[in-house]
Amino acid sequence: MSQDIVADALNQIMNAKKAGKDSVKLKRHSKFLLSLLALGKLKGYISDYSLKEKNLKIKFSNLNFCKAVKPRYVVKILNMDKYVKRYLPARDIGALIITTNQGLMTHQTALDKNLGGSLIAYFY
């Protein structure tokens, strides 16, 4: 088990999806992971998540793939298209999750607000 809670959680989600399950239970979580899951829920990739007795239960619905980005690249607004082409299957499919000085947001929101940041993960 590594020290990166976000990468471990997204790997466990993908392993459960490949095994044909529709939910996964995690013992380790953080506030950062919860805000990442909130963005996934907003975009429709995560159907629900709940925290009960130190266990995080995540139900996913319309998820094809999710992964953490290592190393965490610093993304400027001018170079955003390069990372969209690298990690997402098509321009309007999926979302890059970027952490900025105004919090976590998708790449579309960062483009609208003209903000750069650090690339964390992607969903599609």
Image: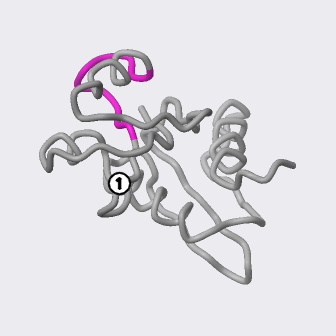
Q: Position of residue 53 (x, y in %)?
A: 73, 83
Classify residue 17 by image quadrant. top right
Hey, which quadrant is residue 13 in on the image? top right
- Does 19 sit left or right of 40 as displayed? right
Residue toward you, 40 or 31: 31
Residue annotated with mark 1:
100
Whether residue 78 is situated above or below residue 96 in the rendered picture = above
Element type where label 1 sits in the image: strand
Q: Which quarter of the figure has residue 90?
A: top left
Percent of width and height locating residue 14? 65, 36
User: Extreme bottom residue here?
Assistant: 53
Whether residue 81 appears in magenta in the rendering, the answer is no
Which residue is drawn at the image coordinates 52% and 49% (left, top)?
A: 60
In magenta stretch: residue 88: yes
Give me the residue at 53% from left, 35% from top.
66
- Residue 42, position as x, y percentages in the image: 32, 56
Quadrant where the C terminus lies? top left
Q: What is the chief secondary structure element of the magenta stretch?
A: loop
Single out the residue that lies furthest toward the left.
112
Amino acid residing under circle 1: Thr
- Image point (49%, 34%), residue name: 73
- Magenta stretch? 87-96
- Is residue 101 found left or right of 24 in the rendered image? left
Above-or-below relation of 8 to 72 = below
Q: What percent of the width, then of the height, locates residue 103?
A: 35, 62
Q: On the rendered structure, is 66 left or right of 1?
A: left
